[in-house]
Image: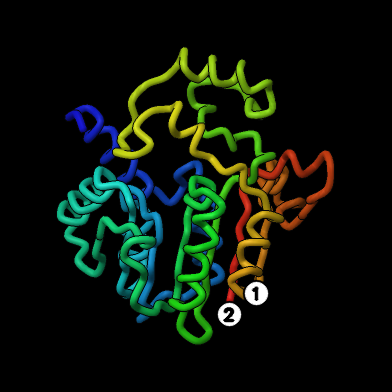
């Protein structure tokens, strides 16, 4: 990882940690605060990335946070930020749970914007572990941009075209390659690998994975463009064509 990528990663993750209005996490943070009290709880941030949300949990509540990620570059940055902000009720670990399964139980397991990056067959195995790792009355909370989302391609910051994932794939891949650049990750190390690693996640696919693990949906919110207006903030339209306006799905599961 170059010094430039290290700085880029730390700046991004620190913004996710400190900024309550970070563009792609504003709704997440508000919703989590409204629905959950993490005080005194044991929290797993699975696929924690560079640690922004792990640090936010640890700083917002008096709780014990464990951030796991498969990418060593992400964990290195997370630990740097932990030390910089002296946030010691959070621990970070590089871990592949298929090789080294979860062996503790948690009150809350969070997956923030990570489920869409994991192959479905592997996601099934991970959810099986989650089912064994939730304490009684524990909660699994998953957030992700559904595949019909205008931003689901994860390359909109360079392509500047919403719903680009629905163009013919040879065109999309050629376009991404023309804009390709390195990313902070050790595994998803550039735009091409980030795009090709997406699993085209939908609520239906997620429910199939959860049902197989015998996890029960206890809450769902589909956040769309029009929810920013106060008169429409609670409106949920999940049918065509309004499903293409959903920017992020939020789903809570229990045993």
Would residue 234 be found to the left or right of residue 4 on screen? right
> Circle 2 sits in a helix, a strand or a loop, which is it?
loop
Residue at figure coordinates x 30%, y 35% from the top left: 184
Residue at figure coordinates x 51%, y 33% from the top left: 196
Lower position in the chain sequence, tag 1 or tag 2: 1
Vertical comparison of 214 with 177: above or below: below
Per the image, the residue denoted by label 2 is 255
Q: Position of residue 234 (x, y in %)?
A: 73, 57
Per the image, the residue denoted by label 1 is 216
Residue at figure coordinates x 52%, y 34% from the top left: 154
* Quarter of the image where one finds residue 168: top right
Q: Residue furthest right?
A: 240
* Quarter of the image where one finds residue 91: bottom left
Q: Position of residue 105 (x, y in %)?
A: 39, 79
> Circle 1 sits in a helix, a strand or a loop, which is it?
strand
Q: Residues within 10 Å of mark 2 (few under 14, many from 20)?
A: some
Residue at figure coordinates x 54%, y 15% from the top left: 175
Vertical comparison of 89 with 8: above or below: below
Would residue 70 be found to the left or right of residue 210 on screen? left
Give the position of the C terminus as an image quadrant. Answer: bottom right
Give the position of the N terminus as an image quadrant. Answer: top left
Give whichever of 51, 30 is nearer the camera. Answer: 51
CA distance for labels 1 and 2:
6 Å
Q: Position of residue 47 (x, y in %)?
A: 39, 55
Q: Residue furthest bottom?
A: 136
Q: Position of residue 16 (x, y in %)?
A: 38, 47
Give whichever of 205, 3 is nearer the camera. Answer: 205
Q: Residues within 10 Å of mark 1 (few under 14, many from 20)?
A: some
Type of colouring: rainbow
Give whichever of 20, 2 is nearer the camera. Answer: 2
Q: Given contact means CB atoms under 8 Å apart, are the residues at marks 1 and 2 in contact? A: yes
């Amino acid at each position: 990882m170059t010094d430039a990528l290290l700085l880029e990663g730390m700046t991004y993750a620190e913004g996710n940690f400190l900024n309550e209005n970070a563009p792609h996490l504003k709704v997440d943070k508000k919703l989590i605060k409204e629905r959950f009290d993490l005080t005194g709880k044991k929290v797993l941030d699975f696929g924690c990335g560079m640690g922004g949300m792990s640090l936010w949990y640890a700083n917002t509540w008096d709780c014990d946070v464990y951030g796991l990620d498969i990418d060593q570059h992400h964990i290195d940055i997370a630990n740097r930020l932990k030390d910089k902000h002296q946030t010691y009720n959070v621990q970070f670990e590089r871990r592949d749970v298929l090789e080294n399964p979860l062996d503790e139980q948690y009150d809350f397991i969070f997956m923030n914007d990570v489920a869409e990056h994991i192959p479905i067959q592997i996601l099934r195995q991970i959810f099986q572990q989650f089912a064994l790792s939730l304490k009684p009355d524990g909660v699994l909370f998953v957030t992700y941009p559904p595949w019909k989302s205008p931003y689901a391609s994860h390359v909109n910051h360079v392509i500047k075209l919403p719903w680009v994932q629905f163009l013919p794939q040879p065109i999309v891949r050629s376009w991404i390659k023309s804009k390709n650049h390195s990313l902070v990750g050790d595994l998803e190390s550039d735009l091409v690998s980030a795009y090709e690693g997406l699993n085209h996640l939908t609520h239906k696919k997620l429910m199939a994975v959860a049902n197989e693990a015998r996890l029960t949906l206890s809450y769902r919110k589909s956040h769309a463009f029009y929810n920013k207006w106060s008169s429409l903030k609670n409106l949920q339209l999940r049918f065509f064509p309004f499903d293409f306006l959903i920017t992020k799905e939020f789903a809570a599961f229990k045993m």
